[in-house]
Image (spheres, helix red, strand yellow):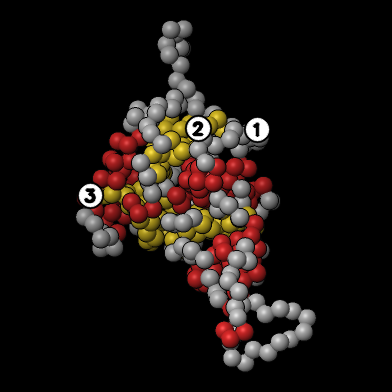
Amino acid sequence: MRWPWTPRRSGHRLLLRPVGTGHAFVLTDGEPSPGQPARLLRWGLLPEAKPVPAGEAIALLDPPDYQILKVDTPQVPPEELKAAARWQVKELMDADVSQLTLDVMHVGGDVERAQRQLFVVAARNSAIQALTAGAAPIHGEVTVVDVWETALRNLVTHRAAADDLAARACAAILIEAAHCLLVVCSGDELFYTRRIEPDPGLLARARGEQPETSAAELPLGFEYQPGGAFDAGGAQESPLVVELQRSIDVWERSWPELPLARLYVVTAQHGAEVAALIQRELGQRTVALDPLAAFAPQRPAPEGDAVPALAACIPLLGAALRAESRQL
């Protein structure tokens, strides 16, 4: 029973991550439920720490502050998985495992395989402490610390379900200036993840902004062929697209029973152009994913400049789709 004078705990959910000297934030009306998307109340960039009332706060670690490793699942009871995983990753880490916080989740969830594997998320304790301390002036207590890979998983599985591809394998590539992250998911589960070096020239190539090539610079052996213009820009492959192809090849060898149905591109601007370029170079069905589309209509405008705000908030929008009934 709740007494009438007892303060009611807010059902709002706050997502935070530090950006420079400020914070990116997303405030929703709570955890989404089937058939009922969460409503976006506020979002954007806070140049300085100002309180944002909410019932729970989820903070996101930035990729340099943690690692995700894949190991064989140890033959121990479920309650002992974290302790056993700590011993398994001890030799793989460049830090003392006593200074790390670990969490685990099964690769592909409950999928049956001869040898199951675990994702082990290892974060520096100092990074978690700095994250929660920095969030304290905005919300008194951080209740959950999340990571980008699971946030991106939430976005791609939500979109795949909307596209009637929930039972198929779908990938998403998050592209931003500092981080590019690839995930492959099926159902609601994460099966594969990889970080890829950003390609500063990708957007220019996608928008056809490559500098003109003079006749003197044309490759030897080039001859004019009627019916089409020579595409000088197309002669230079994007290193990001090359790495995407390598990752897709690894996926197809590792999970031949789950061929990739679609690749989603998640970026703050010009997503359609980037998706078209990747589809043209890979031959893989590729479309842009709007991270705001996972929320109820009539979404508010961002606080701060629109493009930087969206770029900073994309992983937070994915984390806002987190369901508390699942791990990570």
What's the mark number on residue 99?
Answer: 3
Instruction: Give the residue at x 58% y 57%.
Output: 265
Q: Earlier in the sequence, mark 1 or mark 3?
A: 3
In the shown orientation, is residue 121 left or right of residue 229? left
Q: Residue at x 46, y 16 (%)?
A: 8
Secondary structure, mark 1, is loop
| C-alpha separation, residue under disc 1 versus residue under disc 3 | 44 Å
In the image, taking residue 2 as reference, residue 160 lies left or right, namely right
Q: Residues within 10 Å of mark 1 (few under 14, many from 20)?
A: few
* Position above or below: 158 against 175: above
Going from N to C along the chain, the mark reached first, 2 or 3, is 2
Q: Give the number of marks.
A: 3
For this orientation, the residue located farthest to the bottom is 221
Q: Report which residue position mark 2 lands on.
A: 27
Residue type at mark 3 is: Gln
Residue annotated with mark 1:
298
Give the percent coordinates (x, y) of residue 286: 64, 61
Mark 3 residue crowding within 10 angstroms, few (<14) / some (14–19) / many (20+): few
Above or below — where is 234 with respect to 3?
A: below
Question: Residues under labels 2 and 1: Cα distance?
Answer: 14 Å
Q: Mark 2 packing: few (<14 Cα in 10 Å), some, or many (20+)? A: many
Q: Is residue 120 above or below residue 213?
A: above
In the rendered image, the residue lying farthest to the top is 4
Q: Is residue 243 visible?
A: yes
Give the residue type that dot 1 points to.
Gln
Q: Which-is-in-front pick, marks 1 and 3?
A: 1
Q: Where residue 266 is drawn, which disc sits there?
A: none
Question: Residue visible at 59% across and 78% down?
Answer: 213
Q: Nearer the viewer, mark 2 or mark 3?
A: 2
State which tag comes first along the sequence, 2 or 1: 2
Instruction: Looking at the picture, tell me which residue is in the foreground, 95 or 304.
Output: 304
